[in-house]
Image (cartoon, helix red, strand yellow):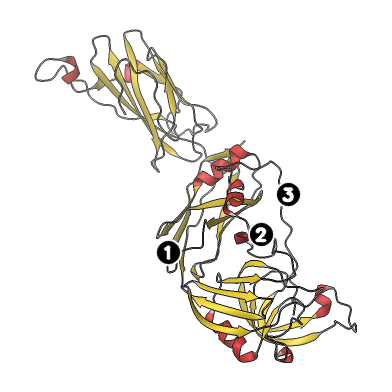
């Protein structure tokens, strides 16, 4: 970026530090003899800077300053960038006598600074400076989820932090550094679940057969007081067909679609009064061929009328608290006609086996027309899709900000509900 003599404010874009490196050589003038056609002279004697020399590491908390030594010359431009290509924002005084950074430097980074000058005759000068910043003493680590693999269109991306981040400004820094891209491209946003957890989801579900890449650019970036981003392992996942199971608790039928086309209709039973199945969109969390389900795990006293202790097969989990879609051979007579379960969606063994073999983690299970409440967005699996898009965006520090000190969501207990 270059500036005319009338332009005195420089805005670079990222981070910096320095130790003097080799500069350019001076030259008398170009073929036409005009000073501006000359190769830049070495401006080492024309400027001073507050960087470090030798093997010393600069303090990333300290701004970088470049000062013109004499009134016979001035600074015309400064650019500073680290080895990752991240530029440092800065300001140049109107008289060209002083430039300073206005954005924090990265910790543990190597910077290159290019200083352009001109003398009283307008001849251009140039000086290149390099330096390194000291590594951070506190690193903010990010772990992305889920594990690499293929998932359904409802699978959110998660980011777990090793330290709490509070305050809209610090959270905005984190969000800017967490990059999610997909092919095909989608509109999406991060949402702060609590001070150490973020979820990313598109406005709508992921496109079928999409590829998703997640990475962090926070390494070395200042997040909060003496807290800097640490390196993070990137994540790549793929998305399969759009599989969506719609359970109508009123008609006692489940309709399963693949890419919008109905592929099966299954008679089911859902939660009876007092144990009504939650409405809303749920995401398949995993599959278990065999689960031992006991009523005591959800607070039903042993020996009571509602007590149970059953071997359950082809169990597809949709909540952390133990809601499944599973085989329920004991209730086949009620399937398609009445709701008699303790919250799970029951079906015949053959239908449960088909469902178990058809769906994968991240697929959508939507319950409608139940007497139960709507599944909470967080704390019991992935109810993320039960937040309307405008409310989801309010959980982003970049979109609408979040309140400080939001209480973490308590993890639900792993309880089977049959």
Local packing at callout 1 (Cα closer than 10 Å; few below 14, some 14-19, many 20+) is some
| Residue named by callout 3 | 407
What SS does tag 1 mark?
A: strand
**Which residue in the structure is indicated by mark 2?**
377
Q: Compare marks 1 and 2 and give the one earlier in the sequence.
A: 1
Image position, residue 383 (x, y; %): 64, 62
Q: CA distance from mark 3 to mark 1?
A: 33 Å
Query: Reading the chain from its start, which is encountered first: label 2 or label 3?
Result: 2
* Residue underneath mark 1: 211
Q: Earlier in the sequence, mark 3 or mark 1?
A: 1
11 left or right of 245? left
Q: Residue at x 55, y 42 (%)?
A: 398
**Where residue 15 sits in the image (x, y, percent)?**
45, 35
Residue 194 visible to the viewer: yes
Q: Residue at x 32, y 15 (%)?
A: 6
Q: Mark 3, residues whose alpha carbon is within 10 Å: few (<14), some, or many (≥20)?
A: few
Crowding at dot 2, Cα within 10 Å, few <14 / some 14-19 / many 20+, comes out as: some
Is 116 located above or below residue 349 in the figure? above
| Label placed on residue 92 | none
Image quadrant assignment for residue 156: bottom right
């Amino acid at each position: 970026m270059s500036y005319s003599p009338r332009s005195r404010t420089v805005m670079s874009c990222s981070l910096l530090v320095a130790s003097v490196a080799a500069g350019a050589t001076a030259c008398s003038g170009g073929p036409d003899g005009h000073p501006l056609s000359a190769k830049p002279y070495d401006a080492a004697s024309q400027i001073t800077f507050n960087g470090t020399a030798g093997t010393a590491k600069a303090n990333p908390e300290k701004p970088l300053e470049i000062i013109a030594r004499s009134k016979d010359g001035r600074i015309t431009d400064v650019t500073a960038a680290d080895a990752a290509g991240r530029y440092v924002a800065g300001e140049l005084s109107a008289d060209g006598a002083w430039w300073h950074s206005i954005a924090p430097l990265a910790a543990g980074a190597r910077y290159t600074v290019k200083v352009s000058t001109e003398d009283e005759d307008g001849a251009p000068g140039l000086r290149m400076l390099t330096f390194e910043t000291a590594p951070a003493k506190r690193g903010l680590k990010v772990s992305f989820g889920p594990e690499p693999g293929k998932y359904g269109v409802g699978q959110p991306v998660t980011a777990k932090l090793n330290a709490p981040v509070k305050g809209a400004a610090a959270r905005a820094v984190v969000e800017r550094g967490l990059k999610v891209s997909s092919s095909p491209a989608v509109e999406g946003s991060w949402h702060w679940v609590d001070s150490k957890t973020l979820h990313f989801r598109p406005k709508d579900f992921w496109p079928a057969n999409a590829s998703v890449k997640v990475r962090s650019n926070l390494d070395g970036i200042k997040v909060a007081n003496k807290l800097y981003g640490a390196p993070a392992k990137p994540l790549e996942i793929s998305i399969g067909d759009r599989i969506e199971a719609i359970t109508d608790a009123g008609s006692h039928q489940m309709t399963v679609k693949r890419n919008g086309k109905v592929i099966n209709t299954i008679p089911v039973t859902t939660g009876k009064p007092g144990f009504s199945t939650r409405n809303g969109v749920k995401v398949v969390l995993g599959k278990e061929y065999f689960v031992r389900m006991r009523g005591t795990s959800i607070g039903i006293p042993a020996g009571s009328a509602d007590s149970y202790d059953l071997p359950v097969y082809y169990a597809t989990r949709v909540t952390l608290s133990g809601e499944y879609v599973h085989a329920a051979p004991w209730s086949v007579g009620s399937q398609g006609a009445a709701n008699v379960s303790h919250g799970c969606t029951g079906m015949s063994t053959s239908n449960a086996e088909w469902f178990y073999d058809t769906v994968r983690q991240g697929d959508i299970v939507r319950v409608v027309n139940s007497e139960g409440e709507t599944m909470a967005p967080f704390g019991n699996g992935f109810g993320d899709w039960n937040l309307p898009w405008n409310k989801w965006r309010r959980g982003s520090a970049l979109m609408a900000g979040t309140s400080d000190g939001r209480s973490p969501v308590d993890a639900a207990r792993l309880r089977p509900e049959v």
